[in-house]
Image (cartoon, rainbow, N blue to C red):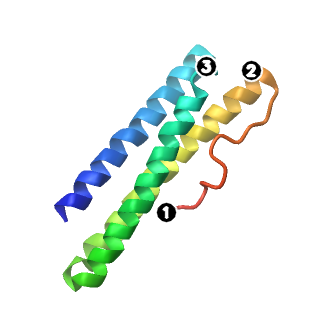
Amino acid sequence: MPDIERKISEMGLMATRTVDETLDAYVSDSIDDVQRIASHSDHVGRLSANIRKDILTSMKDDVDTIDTGADYLVVVGYLKRTADHATDIAEWLVYKRSGKIIELNPGSSSFI
């Protein structure tokens, strides 16, 4: 499933970028980049949905990919949650700095 593996790699890089930027914002106590953080997390969510469809299609078309596909679904879910957690931290930073409660990525809390 090389195409799916490439997409998972891209998703992992974007999730890492989301975490890195969130940590930078936390260390600098800045909320200037929270919209960019939210955008990265949203991108991870869209990748997650697309990859999930690809995995399920592959599993339906070729039963030999079921075990690997199941593992990939778990990995994709964890990467998505990682980006979601980073966004939660960014939301907390906004609250800490401004006293405002915001939802940067509404409706994106599902595992996969």
Q: Quadrant of the N terminus?
A: bottom left
**What's the distance in space between the residues labelled 1 and 2, CA to CA?**
31 Å
Q: Residue 90: which disc? A: none
Between disc 3 and disc 1, the foreground one is 3
- Name the residue that disc number 1 marks: 112
Q: Total marks drawn?
A: 3
Counting from the top left corner in percent of width and height, residue 100 is at 80, 30
- Name the residue that disc number 2 marks: 97
**What's the distance in space between the residues labelled 3 and 1, CA to CA?**
29 Å
Check disc 1 and report its element: helix, strand or loop. Answer: loop
| Mark 1: amino acid | Ile
Give the mark nearest the N terminus, 3 or 1.
3
- Name the residue that disc number 3 marks: 32
Check disc 2 and report its element: helix, strand or loop. Answer: helix
| Mark 3: amino acid | Asp
Quarter-wise, where is residue 94 in the image?
A: top right
Mark 1 in CB contact with mark 2 (< 8 angstroms): no
Counting from the top left corner in percent of width and height, residue 83 is at 50, 44
Between disc 2 and disc 3, the foreground one is 3
**What's the distance in space between the residues labelled 2 and 3, CA to CA?**
11 Å
Counting from the top left corner in percent of width and height, residue 74 is at 40, 64
Residue displayed at 45% across by 48% down: 44
| Mark 2: amino acid | Arg
Is 65 left or right of 57, judged from the image as shown?
left
Give the mark nearest the N terminus, 1 or 2.
2
Quarter-wise, where is residue 95 in the image?
A: top right
Mark 2 in CB contact with mark 3 (< 8 angstroms): no
Residue displayed at 46% across by 45% down: 43
Check disc 3 and report its element: helix, strand or loop. Answer: loop
